Amino acid sequence: MCGTCGCSADTVTIPLEHRVLARNDELARHNRDWLAARDVLAVNLMSSPGSGKTTLLERTIHDLGGSPVVSVVEGDQETARDAERIRATGCRVVQVNTGSGCHLDAAMVAKALRELDPPARSVVFVENVGNLVCPALFDLGERHRVVVTSVTEGEDKPLKYPHMFASADVVVLNKIDLLPHLDFEVGAFVRHLHRVNDRARLLPLSATAGAGTGEWTAQLRDWTS
Amino acid sequence: MHELSITQEVVAAITARLPDTRITVVRLEIGKLSGVVADSVRFCFDLVTEGTAVEGAALVIEEPAGRARCRACVHEYEAEWLVVLCPECGSAAAEVLSGNELRITSVEVSRECAAPADALRTR
C-alpha cells in the first residue's frame, strides 16, 4: 500500500543517480576556493589517536618560527585539551568537538575557517579526529593530506587501513627515537605502504627528539613557495 | 562509524529531492572498494529514517566488485580490496577502475503519488 495516500497502486521507480558525498564534496570545493583566494595552504593531518599529531604541530610551529604564520583547526570528539596546547604556542586555534562524530567534514571545517580567519599566505593545519578509518572518506578542501603514524603502532598499519594510507601525499613515521627499543622494521613498513600507495613521500622523524623534522619543515616550505 | 553520517546524508538527499513523498524502496550502490560497509548502513537505516518520509522503506544495496588496472603491465583484474597486487606481473601500482561507487541509484514511490511528477514539486 502507498504510504502517502493509502492507495494500493503499484510503485514507480524514480532514478536519482545521486552521489552520497556530493554535498560534502561541494562544500569542500568551496573551502578549497576560499583558501586559494587567500593563498592559504591547508593540510589535513590524520592518524590514529596517540600517534603524535599535536606534538608534531607544537614542534612545527616552533621550527617555522612564525614564517609562514600557522593556525590550527583542532578536531576531537571531546575536550579542548589539544587546542589549549596549540594556543600555548601563541598560534591561533579553533577547536571543533564532533561529539558522537568520528571525523571532520567539510561543513565543520568551513565554519571553523571563518572563525579562524587565517591571514593571506599562511598555513592552516586541520588536525582531524584520531581515527584511521572514517576521516579518509571526507574531503575537507585541503591542498595536501598527511597521515601520521608511529613506530609503536606496528608495520602493518597501511595494510590494515588502506583507504587512509592510499589517500596520503605524505606519510610521517613518528617516534623513530624509540626504534632501538622496538621490534619495528622500517623496511617492512615501507613495503606495506607501497602496496597501497606508491606515490606518497615518507618522512621518518621524532617530533619530541627532533630527528628528521628538518625534512618535514622543508616539505612545508616547499608547499608554500 | 562514518556509515551513520553516510546514511543520514542518503535520507537528507532523498527528502530534499522528493519532499512530502512517501518512499517505499531505496536503492543504493556501495562499491566493494568504497570504504563504506553496506551492513553498517543497513544497521543504521531504520534508526536514521525514523520519523522521516523514508521510514519503513525497503533498503536494497548493490555492491559492485572492484576492478583495477596495473600501471606496470596494463593488465585489468578484479580487486577484492584496496591492497592489490597484479596477478600477471606482481606490481602493486594499480589504478582503481571501479568499486568506489557510493550512490543513491533510485527510489520507489507509489504510482498514484508519483504522477503527475510536477504536482509533487509544487506541493
Image (spheres, grey):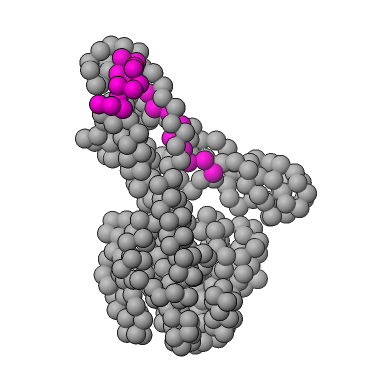
- Residue A189, relative to residue A181: is it above or below? above
A192 falls in the magenta region? no
Residue at x 32% of width, y 36% of height: B16
Over which residues does the magenta segment extend? B100-123
Residue, x 40% and y 65% (percent of image)? A128
Q: Please indicate whether residue A114 sits to the left or right of residue B69 in the image.
A: left
**Vertical comparison of A99 with A20: above or below:** below
Disc tally is 0
Nearer the observer, A25 or B84: A25
Residue A107 seen in the current view: yes
Q: Where is residue A125? Give x, y as percent.
A: 43, 71
Q: Is residue A135 left or right of residue B72?
A: left
For residue B105: magenta? yes
Q: Position of residue A167 (x, y in %)?
A: 54, 58
Residue at (36% x, 60% y) in the render: A110
Image quarter where the N terminus of chain A lies is top left
Percent position of residue A131, x then y: 41, 61
Question: Is A186 in front, or is A120?
Answer: A120
Q: Quadrant of the C terminus of chain A?
A: bottom right
The residue nearer to you, when weighing A56 against B116, is B116
Q: Is residue B11 left or right of residue B90?
A: left
Q: Quadrant of residue B48?
A: top left
Q: Residue at x 42, y 60 (%)?
A: A31
Q: Front-most of A109 and A198? A: A109
Q: Is residue B88 above or below residue A42?
A: above
